[in-house]
Amino acid sequence: MAIVNKYGGSLGALISDITDASLYCLNPENLSVSDYSLDLLSELVKNHVSKPQLTIGIQKVADLGNASFINEGTVEWILKFFTQLATNVKDLNYKDIIHDLQGKIVSIKTTLPAKIIATIVTVIPALYSAYIAEYDKTLTTGDNDKKLMSAIVIGEIGKRKDLSALKDIVKRIDKMFLDENAQIRQAASHCLGSISHGNVDFFFPKVLELIKQDIPHKYLLLVSINDIIVANRGKEFENINGLLDILFENANSEEENIRNVVAECLGWLFPDNGTVMVIELTDKFNSPSKNMLTTVGKALKYAVQKNNDVANLKEIVPNYLDLCRNEDMEVR
């Protein structure tokens, strides 16, 4: 890497050999070696890779998504490669690349192709304008495969770019909650949470309003809320009191899936909002409701997993130990 950075094009034919060796080392079965190769290839695409090598490289990098398990670090290296590619190589047929990637998005779990598409289109303005309009349209007018793909890709684009200018985007996503296809409903839920990454101040109040009105799809909207909370990691959550009102209202739900997602939301909030959370959770530990107690108990479990705020955790642990001695077996 240091040699390529320093001498680059002056290495002549040796660059081609280095590129071939890097491509050879891309292997879904050995991601640690692949990470080093991706780092090197990200540098090589700036100036030095031939078109035939690029064609092979794009396919092999995308195929890393076929690994039985792919960690976040490898995903970041893959996206770095495509960022450098889109930034430095302007004369590729990106429409064909995107078309191939779209075909790989077959469920809500196949997010890597969507991340790559989002990376490419947010780097190249002309592609962004064309594709965001297409995806926005097919959210409600496409067949099931296109609706699913569009929701997943728009969500990934929304993590990288403010989509608040897309007129009525929240209303269109909310309509997808009515779809008969469960995958489309789930994709819509994550899409709504994901686009909020780009502009939390704009989207979050709209999601709160929906959750107050949309009783039948409360679970899906709470999943969106969870995605928004995760996107806000590292800083205090604005309007946390309004959020906590909704979460605690649903912490007492008769539906276990709703209580579970509320518990995870509360757990994610704890690391950056510890002082407020200690006060609110301490109060709820005195609730006579079994559902409330099981929810706040699970919330503390999530908080411990995601938290290094030891001081505030110490404040709440005695309450948790009391729950462990509760006479109700479900609470224990």
Image (tube, rainbow, N blue to C red):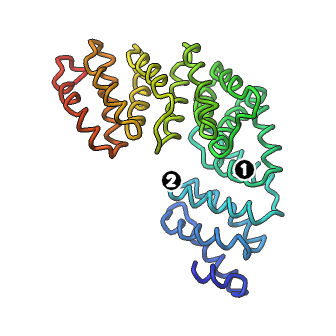
Please state which of residues 41 and 5 is positioned toward the viewer in this rendering.
5
Q: Please identify the quarter of the rendering in which residue 40 is found.
A: bottom right
12 with respect to 33 (left or right): right
Residue occupying the point 22% across, 27% down: 319
Whole-angstrom CA distance, mark 2 to mark 1, is: 20 Å
Residue 159, how many percent across, how many down? 62, 43
26 with respect to 126 (left or right): left
Residue occupying the point 71% across, 30% down: 144
Please state which of residues 31 and 304 is positioned toward the viewer in this rendering.
304
Dot 2 alpha-carbon crowd within 10 angstroms: few under 14, some 14 to 19, many 20 or more: few
Dot 1 alpha-carbon crowd within 10 angstroms: few under 14, some 14 to 19, many 20 or more: some
Q: Looking at the image, is 63 positioned above or below residue 146?
A: below
The numbered mark at residue 331 is: none
Total number of numbered discs in the rendering:
2
Q: Looking at the image, is 192 positioned above or below residue 50?
A: above
Image quarter hosting the N terminus: bottom right
Amino acid type assigned to the residue bearing label 1 in the image? Thr
Residue 213, how many percent across, how many down? 58, 13
Q: Please identify the quarter of the rendering in which residue 191 is found.
A: top right
Residue 229, how many percent across, how many down? 49, 35
The numbered mark at residue 122 is: 1
Please state which of residues 183 and 278 is positioned toward the viewer in this rendering.
278
Image quarter hosting the C terminus: top left
20 with respect to 224 (left or right): right
Sequence-wise first label, 2 or 1? 2
Amino acid type assigned to the residue bearing label 2 in the image? Glu
Tell whether label 1 touches label 2 (CB within 8 Å): no
Question: Dot 2 corresponds to which residue?
Answer: 72
Q: Dot 1 lies on which element?
A: helix
